[in-house]
Image (cartoon, rainbow, N blue to C red):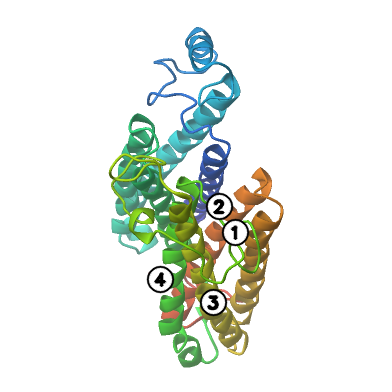
Amino acid sequence: MQKMRSYRLLVLACVCLTFIVVVVGAYVRLSDAGLGCPDWPGCYGKLTPASAESHIKRAVEEQGGTHGPVSMPKAWKEMGHRYLAGSLGLLILAVAVLAWLRRRLLGQSPLLAIAIVVVVAFQATLGKWTVTMLLKPAIVTSHLIGGMTTLALLAWLAVRQWPLKAAEDASCVKAQHSFAVVALATLCVQIVLGGWVSTNYAALACPDLPLCRGAVVPAMDFGNAFHVVRELGMTPDGTLLSADALVAIHWTHRMFALLVAAILGVLALRLMKTVGARLPGLLLLGGLVAQLLLGLGNVVFGLPLGLAAAHNAGAALLLVLLVVINYVTFHGLALRLGETQAPHA
C-alpha cells in the first residue's frame, strides 16, 4: 500500500510540475524571452547564463541594447524554463520505470506511462527546434501542443491511480460521456487556435469589444493567416504578414471561443444535474467563466503579462478538468469528497 501511495504522489507531482512548466513556458514566450539563449540545451554552450555572461554582453552590444531578443534577464527566464522541463523529464522517466517494475502491484498496464516518456522526448526535440529555427510559428505552436498533450496524458494517468467509487446511478453519469468527448475535442481545437494567436503575436489584433476593429466581420486575410510553413511575421513569399492576417487569426480564436463556451457550458449544466457528477460540473462552470473573463481582460487591459499567462494557465486547468470528467463519465464514477474505492484501470 505504501508503494502504491508513493507512486500516486509521484504521478501527482508530475501533473503539478507539468502545469508549472506549461505556464512558465507561456510566460517566457509572452515576455519575448524565447531566444534569450539562442542555442540548446545550454546557454552559449554553458550550463548557466552566469557562465555565459561575456557572450550575452557581446550579443546585447551587437543588437544595440537589451530591447532585442538577448539579455541577461531573458536568458535566465529561458534557462529557468529548461531547468524545470529537464527536472520534469527525469520525474516522468521515474514514473515510467516504476510503472513497469510495479505493474503487478498496481494492476495496471505501464504502456501509458511509457507513451508519456516518448511524448516528452519528442517535446524536448520541439523545444530545441523552437530555438534553433528562430521561433517559427508552426514549431512554437507544436511545442505548446506537446506540453498540453503531456499534461493531459499525465492527468489521465493520475486519475487512474485515485480511488473513486461507482456513482449511485452510473448509467446517468456514463450518459454524459459522449458530450464530454465533444467538449474535450472542442477545447483542444481552441487551445491550438490560442497557441497560433500567441505565436503570431496577434493577441491585440482586435483591440475592441465586442466588435473587432469596429466591425462584426472585419477585413481579413485567411490565406496567409493560417499558412503553416512560414517564418515568424512573414508570408510564405517572404513579405511582411499583414494586419489583416493577424486580425483573421485573432477573430477566429474569438469566434471559436463562443462555440467552446456554449459546449462547455451545456456540459457543466448537465453534470450539475447528474448525481455523482455535480462537483466536476460546478468546477467546469467556474473554470469556464474565469477563463472567459481572463480572455476579455487581456483585450480590455492591453495584454498585461500576468493576465496573459493566467489565460494560458486557465486553458491548462480546463484541459485537466475535462480529462478528469471524461474519465469519470467513461467509468460511471462518482467524483465526490469522501467516497472511495479501488482505482480503475
Does the CB distance between marks 3 and 2 fall below 8 Å? no
Which quadrant would residue 154 be assigned to in this image? bottom left
Q: Position of residue 103 (x, y in %)?
A: 33, 57
**Cα separation between marks 1 and 2:** 16 Å
Q: Residue at image x 35%, y 44%?
A: 139
Secondary-structure class at tag 2: loop
Secondary-structure class at tag 1: helix
Secondary-structure class at tag 3: helix
**Cα separation between marks 3 and 1:** 14 Å
Task: Please tell me how many numbered marks the rendered image carries.
Answer: 4
Q: Residue at image x 60%, y 78%?
A: 281
Q: In the image, what residue type sits under mark 4?
A: Ala
Q: Which mark is residue 185?
A: 4
* Residue 159 can be seen in this image: no
Q: Which mark is residue 276?
A: none
In the image, 315: left or right of 209?
left
**Cα separation between marks 4 and 3:** 11 Å
**Cα separation between marks 4 and 2:** 23 Å
Q: In the image, what residue type sits under mark 1?
A: Gly
Disc on the earlier residue, 4 or 2 = 4
**Cα separation between marks 4 and 1:** 16 Å
Q: In the image, what residue type sits under mark 3?
A: Leu
In this rendering, is residue 341 above or below 68?
Answer: below
Disc on the earlier residue, 4 or 3 = 4
Disc on the earlier residue, 4 or 1 = 4
Q: Which mark is residue 314?
A: 1
Q: Nearer the viewer, residue 261 or 16?
A: 261
Q: Residue at image x 58%, y 24%?
A: 67
- Classify 10 Å Cα crowding around label 2: few (below 14), some (14-19), many (20 and above): many
